[in-house]
Image: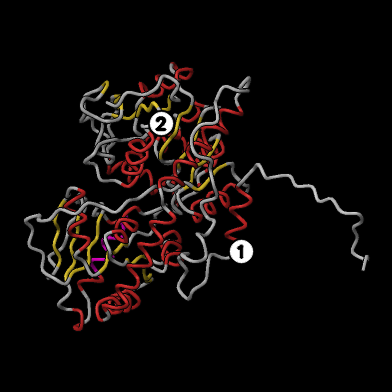
Amino acid sequence: MMARETSSPRIAFVVPQYGLDLGGGLERLCQLIAERMRNAWDIEVLTTCSRDFSTWANYYPAGLAQGTDVRVRRFPVERERDPDSFRRLTDSVLQGSPTREEEEQWIGAQGPDCPALFNYIESHFQDFELFIFFGYLYSTTSLGIWRARGKSVLVPAAHDEPMIRLSVYRDVLRAADFILYSTPEERILVESILGETTRGEIAGVGCEVPELAPEIGIEVPTPYLIYVGRVDHPKGCGELLHFFAHRPPGLSRLNLCLVGHKRMEIPPIEGVYWLGYRSDEEKNHLVSGALALVNPSPYESLSLVLLEGWLCGVPVLVNGRCSVLRGQCQRSGGGLSYIDDETFYQAVRAVYHSPAFRSLLAIRGGRYARQMYSWERVEAAYWKALREVAAALPGSAGILPARGPQASCLLAPPTPSTAPTEQGGRMPSAPVQARCLRSQEERPKLAFVIPWYGKNIP
């Protein structure tokens, strides 16, 4: 483990699960940020012993993990979750008008039930300058954030899903002292639900040109589309497989590769290949050889795989019913969206039959990912969160030196000579840029000195 200066801020990252082989978007986001910020911060990841969010069964040993670059402290889950009974409870809560008591019962059943983690936050509150909670949905945040009031930052990973509109989650979102969003759409969603402007910044995640494995020993029939992520119905995989099973004759030679842990049955469909979970190098090799990367998910707060796809040199096809995915494609000009089977086939034909158009989309997407998701921007946002939360603590004057890069507006477009454009050549609209300006709470005060001033002066 890398040695740090004693003056480094001590920061706790709180996340339901943490492991290099988990593959989930939330866990991956936490891991990337932790590994990047550990050079400047003294980071300790607080998480459970589980690696299966469907049951929360303990898997890893409790205590400090061994052989990790970042200090990871795991706590045991006291009570496992039964997926079937939880599904029935979820249906009853979301289909009705639940009382506050019923919502809190659902939060407890959602889990993970990890009282030792909550007790650790309370007993070590003074040991950390900041607690950063990843994901609004699980009890590590919904119950844990109340133990860290005054030092809490939330990375919500918020989707436009029914659960986020429960009253208990509105309280959780308001409890955060600072919110780090992943996209403009996520911030708009949260603020529309709360009906108020939040104290926060758009951070996202940094991305770099990935390493490709020269040979992976996997024979994949070409041409193919690729999906990367958890193979599951909530991720839109059922619909994607249905579209692919009924593809028109002109696309019959096209194949589909699924990369990731499987949580649903994959029906026998000609041209569909499930390749299981793969290392980053293997995954990137597979992505780079695809016609396009497909993200069919209706719920996303960022989509790391879109950025990775663009940096691997391929365009993306996304579920246009997800505002985050649609917005990413519109801002970058690096992909196409669909809303049903016919528009899916149209998008596939566009990249299948035109190599030049496919290359253009990939170039635009790669340029957008490199410019708008640099690590310098991300680091600046996390440092801003630390400074603002520390400054609000009682008696905080001078406790935190001005360290790290200054935060800048992540929505400000790049220089005009190299700025990526939306499809049609337009930059992000004025309201979007204005929202960024409103997010900066400390605006410069300017004095205009002039002999006289008035509208009726010629």
Seen in the picture, residue 359 relative to 74 is either above or below; the reply is below
For disc 1, the marked residue is: 430
Seen in the picture, residue 123 relative to 210 is either above or below; the reply is above
For the point 89% across and 64% down, the residue is 455
What label sits on residue 188 in the rendered view?
A: none
Q: Nearer the viewer, mark 1 or mark 2?
A: 2
Image-based side of 402 in relation to 340, left or right: right
Tell me which colouring the rendered structure shows. secondary structure
- The secondary structure type at the circle numbered 1 is helix
Seen in the picture, residue 368 relative to 139 is either above or below; the reply is below
User: In this orientation, does residue 78 appear?
Assistant: no
Any magenta on residue 241?
yes
Q: Look at label 1 and name its amino acid.
A: Ala
User: From the image, which quarter does the N terminus lie in?
Assistant: top left
Q: Nearer the viewer, residue 238 or 127?
A: 127
Q: CA distance from mark 1 to mark 2?
A: 35 Å
Q: Look at label 2 and name its amino acid.
A: Ala
Residue 286, given in percent of the width and then of the height, sits at 18, 59
Q: What range of the chain is rendered magenta?
A: 235-242
Residue 447, given in percent of the width and then of the height, sits at 79, 47
> In which quadrant of the rendered view does residue 243 lie?
bottom left
